[in-house]
C-alpha cells in the first residue's frame, strides 16, 4: 500500500504564531520534522500542508513539497483532509509539525500497522518522562485497554485515583503520529464541527472516537517532546543537541 506523510503547519497558531518557522538550532522546526519524515517514507512522499506562503517558500526551498490549504481549517486533521484531496495514496500519515524529535522508525511503524488493518485508526503514545509534568494541560494523556485500544484522551492526568496508594506509577501521553485513509479523513472533515469532547479537551482525535471509530495506540520511542509554547524551545533544543551530538 502506498503511504505518504503530510505535516500540517499553520502559521496563525493561537498559542504560538509562526511556530512552524521557529528556529531550532538555526533550522526552522518544520524542516526538522520533514527531514525525519523523509527517512521513513522518502522525501518524494513528504508534504507540508499550510495556509501561509512564508511556510511554503521555506519548505520548497529545502526541496520538499507544499500543499496550500485554506485558512479556516478547524484542526490540523481538517487541514490534512483538505490536503489529501490533492494527492493519491492509500495511507496518509499525519506527523505534527511541532514534533522535531520524532523517530522515523515510529513513522514507518505507523504506516505498517495501518497497512495491516486499514479499518483501524492508528496513533502513537509514549510514557510521560520524569522530566515532564503529567498534570500539564499541554500534554494529552491517554488511557487504553490492555490491548492498546484507546478508551479516552484528556488534558487531565488520567487515569484518576481515589486512594493515593493507587496512583499510577506512569502515565501515557499522545505522540502526534497518526495513520488514516482518505475515507476516514473525509468523515472527520465532513462532520463539519468539533465534537463536544473534542472541543472541551481541545484534542482532535476525540472527534474520531465521537464518530464511533476504533483507535489503536502503539508505543513509540521514548524522549519525544513537542513545542507547544515558546517555553518549550530551550528544552527541545537541548534534547536535539543530545540526540545529534551537536
Image (spheres, grey):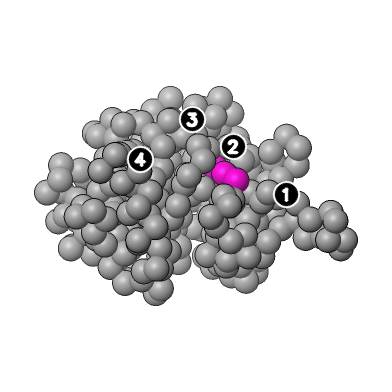
- From the viewer's perspective, tell me whether residue 176 is left or right of residue 20: right
Q: Nearer the viewer, mark 4 or mark 2?
A: 4
Instruction: Give whichever of 44, 69 is nearer the camera.
Output: 44
Distance between the alpha carbons at the discs numbered 1 and 4: 26 Å
* Residues shaded magenta: 123-127
Q: Position of residue 19 (x, y in %)?
A: 31, 64
List the residue tagged with mark 2: 218
In this picture, is 24 found above or below 156? above
Q: Is residue 126 part of the magenta span, yes or no?
A: yes
Q: Residue at x 23, y 59 (%)?
A: 23
Residue occupied by mark 1: 169
Question: Label 4 to label 2, Cα distance in Å?
Answer: 22 Å
Residue 123 location, x and y as percent? 55, 43
Instruction: Tell which circle, 4 or 3, labels the residue nearer the N-terminal end.
Output: 3
Looking at the image, do the residues carrying marks 3 and 2 touch, with CB atoms under 8 Å apart? yes
State if disc 4 and disc 1 touch (CB < 8 Å): no
Identify the secondary structure beneath mark 3. helix
Crowd rating for badge 4 (residues with CA inside 10 Å; few <14, some 14–19, many 20+): few
Amino acid at each position: 500500500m502506498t503511504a505518504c506523510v503530510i505535516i500540517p503547519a499553520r502559521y496563525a497558531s493561537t498559542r504560538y504564531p509562526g511556530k512552524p518557522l521557529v528556529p531550532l538550532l538555526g533550522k526552522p522546526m518544520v524542516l526538522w520534522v520533514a527531514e525525519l519524515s523523509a527517512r521513513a517514507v522518502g522525501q518524494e512522499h513528504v508534504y507540508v500542508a499550510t495556509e501561509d506562503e512564508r511556510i511554503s517558500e521555506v519548505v520548497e526551498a529545502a526541496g520538499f513539497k507544499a500543499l496550500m490549504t485554506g485558512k479556516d481549517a478547524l484542526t490540523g486533521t481538517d487541514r490534512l483532509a483538505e490536503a489529501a484531496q490533492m494527492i493519491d495514496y492509500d495511507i496518509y500519515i499525519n506527523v505534527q509539525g511541532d514534533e522535531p524529535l520524532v523517530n522515523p522508525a515510529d513513522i514507518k511503524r505507523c504506516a505498517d500497522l495501518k497497512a495491516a488493518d486499514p479499518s483501524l485508526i492508528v496513533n502513537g503514545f509514549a510514557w510521560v518522562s520524569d522530566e515532564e509534568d503529567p498534570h500539564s494541560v499541554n500534554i494529552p494523556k491517554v488511557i487504553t485497554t490492555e490491548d492498546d485500544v484507546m478508551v479516552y484522551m484528556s488534558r487531565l492526568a488520567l487515569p484518576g485515583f481515589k486512594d493515593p496508594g493507587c496512583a499510577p506509577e506512569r502515565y501515557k501521553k499522545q505522540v502526534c503520529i497518526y495513520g488514516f485513509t482518505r475515507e476516514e479523513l473525509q468523515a472527520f472533515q465532513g462532520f463539519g464541527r468539533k465534537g463536544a469532547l473534542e472541543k472541551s479537551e481541545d484534542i482532535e482525535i476525540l472527534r474520531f472516537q465521537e464518530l464511533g471509530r476504533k483507535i489503536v495506540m502503539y508505543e513509540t520511542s521514548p524522549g519525544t517532546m513537542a513545542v507547544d509554547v515558546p517555553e518549550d524551545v530551550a528544552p527541545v533544543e537541548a534534547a536535539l543537541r543530545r540526540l545529534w551530538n551537536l
